[in-house]
């Protein structure tokens, strides 16, 4: 999952081509990814804590507005987009041709979709009696299979790694076979809403295809971003009167909005790091500010028609979030890469390089505690103690990722 995990280090092809990036390490990308993961774990843990202010909880679907947690998922999509040009340049420098590159992207997206489907089916609707096991045990076995399948192995003999991956794949297929859902246990795994990882997978796939078709050209990618927003606007609320094909395309409208956020990340990488007529740093920041202002302006214009809602993936929510991310990255880049204030970034590096591992650890912990019937003291489920516990838990997860890395557990799609 290089395009998502650790694209801060990229190697550009010897001959500069449209859309290629210079060979450099962008620590601000790592830092922004690590911060996003930390905040993601924090707000997820905080979701069950009573007595928190409204701005620390996701806004209800029908409320025309957004809160701090509502920007976390877009920030992850934005970083996915920022990673794409670096990852493509790295793969091309390694000698990948066009078909191999596209196959690599498709494999990554498929892996995210598979993970998302498994995780969302463990959230509800399952029939444990028909499965013959607790959903929590099923989940733990699923995460074990995922680690076996997507771990980066460092054996002297590659056959060992292949054997472990085959074992993980076999376990994953078995778990898919025994899963049962519905009152009668006659249903199996279904996509449902794909889960967060699945939504990231769709956005990554579409944004990667747009980057490929645009050949990394900034204006073409900005056009693709606008087209994604237009897709949602045109199809919203009218699909039922259209042909089956039109309804199918309209069903991807929310994925198009997520893709727009990822494309904003792609464009931000190109604005800051592509060799565009020798732009000076001040001009790059001016262009990034113009992009953020344009995104926010479009969000303001569209708000009366669609409102702001993370749950409904409205254009205004996406565009406001993308504008915030552009400005946040600009600040981090100035602080970390330009001013060299880097001492604090090391804490985030293991999680930034292994976001998939960091993402699934809280789910593993939850499934394990539920399987063992262990709960938190009630004092940690409310008020200031709950808030401090959620923050401490998020920090602990990042340290756990560091420890697992030392044990050679690193997931990569």
Image: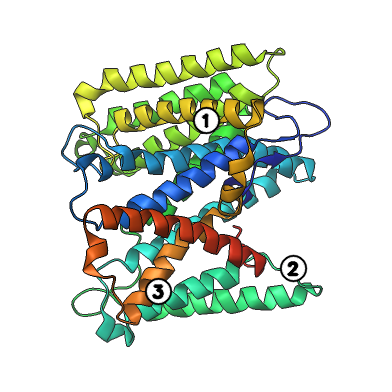
Give the label, 1 or 2, closer to the camera: 1
**Callout 2 crowding tier (Cα within 10 Å): few <14, some 14–19, many ≥20:** few
**Callout 3 crowding tier (Cα within 10 Å): few <14, some 14–19, many ≥20:** many
Give the label, 1 or 3, closer to the camera: 1
The residue at which mark 3 appears reads as 139
Pick the front one: 135 or 333:
333
Return the x and y of residue 163 as percentages of the image width and height.
68, 78
Q: CA distance from mark 1 to mark 3?
A: 35 Å
Pick the front one: 140 or 26:
26
**Callout 1 crowding tier (Cα within 10 Å): few <14, some 14–19, many ≥20:** many
Query: Which residue extends farthest bottom?
Result: 132
Between discs 3 and 2, the one toward the N terminus: 3
Examine the rendering and report whether any part of residue 249 can be seen: no
Lateral position of residue 103 relative to residue 237, left or right: right
- As drawn, the label of residue 154 is 2
Against 281, is 59 above or below?
below
């Amino acid at each position: 999952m290089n395009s998502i995990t650790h694209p801060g280090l990229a190697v550009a092809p010897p001959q500069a081509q449209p859309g290629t990036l210079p060979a450099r390490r962008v620590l601000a990308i790592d830092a922004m990814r690590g911060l996003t993961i930390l905040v993601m774990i924090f707000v997820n843990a905080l979701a069950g804590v009573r007595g928190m202010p409204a701005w620390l909880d996701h806004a209800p679907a029908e409320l025309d507005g957004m809160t701090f947690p509502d920007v976390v998922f877009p920030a992850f999509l934005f970083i996915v987009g920022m990673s794409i040009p670096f990852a493509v340049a790295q793969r091309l420098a390694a000698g990948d041709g066009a078909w191999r590159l596209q196959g690599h992207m498709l494999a990554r997206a498929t892996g995210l979709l598979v993970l998302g489907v498994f995780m969302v089916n463990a959230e509800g609707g399952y029939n444990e009696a028909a499965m013959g096991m607790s959903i929590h045990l099923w989940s733990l076995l699923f995460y074990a299979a995922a680690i076996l399948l997507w771990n980066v192995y460092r054996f002297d003999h590659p056959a060992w790694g292949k054997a472990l991956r085959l074992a993980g794949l076999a376990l994953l297929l078995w778990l898919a076979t025994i899963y049962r859902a519905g009152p009668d246990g006659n249903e199996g795994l279904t996509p449902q809403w794909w889960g967060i990882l699945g939504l990231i997978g769709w956005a990554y796939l579409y944004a990667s295809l747009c980057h490929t078709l645009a050949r990394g050209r900034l204006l073409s990618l900005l056009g693709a971003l606008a087209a994604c927003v237009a897709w949602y606007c045109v199809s919203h609320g009218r699909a039922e009167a259209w042909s089956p094909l039109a309804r199918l395309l309209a069903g991807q409208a929310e994925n198009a909005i997520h893709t727009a956020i990822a494309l904003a990340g792609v464009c931000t990488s190109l604005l800051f790091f592509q060799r565009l007529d020798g732009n000076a740093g001040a001009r790059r920041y001016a262009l990034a500010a113009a992009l953020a202002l344009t995104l926010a302006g479009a969000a303001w214009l569209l708000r009366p028609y669609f409102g702001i809602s993370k749950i409904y993936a409205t254009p205004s929510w996406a565009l406001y979030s993308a504008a915030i991310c552009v400005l946040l990255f600009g600040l981090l880049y100035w602080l970390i890469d330009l001013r060299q204030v880097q001492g604090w970034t090391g804490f985030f590096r293991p999680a930034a390089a292994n976001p998939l591992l960091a993402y699934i650890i809280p789910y593993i912990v939850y499934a394990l505690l539920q399987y063992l019937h262990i709960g938190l003291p009630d004092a940690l489920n409310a008020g200031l103690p709950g808030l401090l516990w959620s923050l401490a838990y998020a920090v602990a997860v990042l340290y756990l990722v560091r420890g697992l890395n030392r044990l050679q557990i690193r997931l990569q799609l």
